[in-house]
Amino acid sequence: MNGTKSLVESSLLTGMAVVLFLAARYLPVAGIVLSLLCPAPLVILGLRHRPKMSFVGLVVATAIVALLTGPASAISFCLGFGVLGVGLGILASRLDQAVDIMLYGVVVSLVSKLALMVVLTKMTGVNPFDPDVDQIRATMEKVFSMYGGQDLSSVKEQVEQTIKAIPLMFPAMLTMASAVDCLLSYWVSRKVLARIGGIVLPSLPPFAQWRFPKSLLWAFAFSMVILLFEGSLRDPLLSRVGLNLRLLISMMFMIQGLSLTWDYMEYRSLSRFWRITLAFLIVFIPILSQIAVVLGLTDVWANIRTRYRR
């Protein structure tokens, strides 16, 4: 690739990263999805050219965001999305296995987001790990008031418990967001690079083959021990560790349960439409999610797939 073409393509990718970030900032619904795609242009930039160019692109994009929306937004772009894009590009250029790239990428994403939280706390004085529960509660009261005289006492109680748990669950939620962010950025980058040619990123294993190691059961056992004795331990930090560990492990078990269900539907030759529909229902219907968690735990322990595929 000659110098002029390289410069033009680098500029376009840098501009795309800025546009995605600004769109994510100002579009209310689509912004949630667009924010997860912000790192992808920098991943492609680092792979199509040199890792050094992705650093240059990050600096330029951060400067543009600072000029357009201010320093706080620029820091959010740089640490929240840019570092992950540069990091994934470097990892993809040095590692051969998609799983390895993803694992290290999640670590990069999590560390950069933690750094962002620390910097924003210093700048604004507001601790993101301790959200304003009173404001969330007031917002929910306004929502409930729209339903007039309906009896929503049980729903209100569940919401109240969830609101109280949000500050405690924030580390686990941040970790899960980092994993989703990394996965989507890698997936989008791989699709784009496959279309424009030149570089092929290794593919992740098919979802039906996703399995977590048995060592996950030890982490689950540890979290259960904390759950059983948290009343007598009276240690807030240990209780928070146990809560976040249980939340993360339950999510991993649910993913494995979904993978097992997907594999069984493939085994029974169900159409893709029905597989996607059932997966959607499992994610959004709590009782089905719990069943998926139990299935995932059982599959980690006993490898159910080998039994119906004999």
Image (cartoon, grey):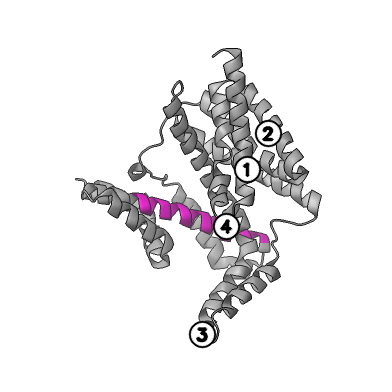
Q: Of marks 2 and 1, which one's residue comes earlier in the chain?
A: 1
Q: Quickly name the residue at label 1.
A: 21
Residue under the point 50% across and 52% down: 219
Q: Quickly name the residue at label 2.
A: 61
Residue 144: percent from left, percent from top: 57, 77
Rendering quarter of residue 8: top right
Q: Quickly name the residue at label 4.
A: 244
- In space, the residues marked 3 and 2 are separated at their CA atoms by 50 Å
Q: Quickly name the residue at label 3.
A: 150
Q: Of marks 4 and 3, which one's residue comes earlier in the chain?
A: 3
Q: Looking at this view, is 131 or 11 the one in front?
A: 11
Q: Are marks 2 and 1 in contact (CB under 8 Å)?
A: yes
Q: Main secondary structure of the magenta part?
A: helix
Label 4: how many residues lie within 10 Å, few (<14), some (14-19) or many (20+)? Answer: many
Q: Of marks 4 and 2, which one's residue comes earlier in the chain?
A: 2
Which element is circle 3 on? loop
Q: What's drawn in magenta, residue-wise?
A: 237-259
Residue type indicated by callout 4: Asn
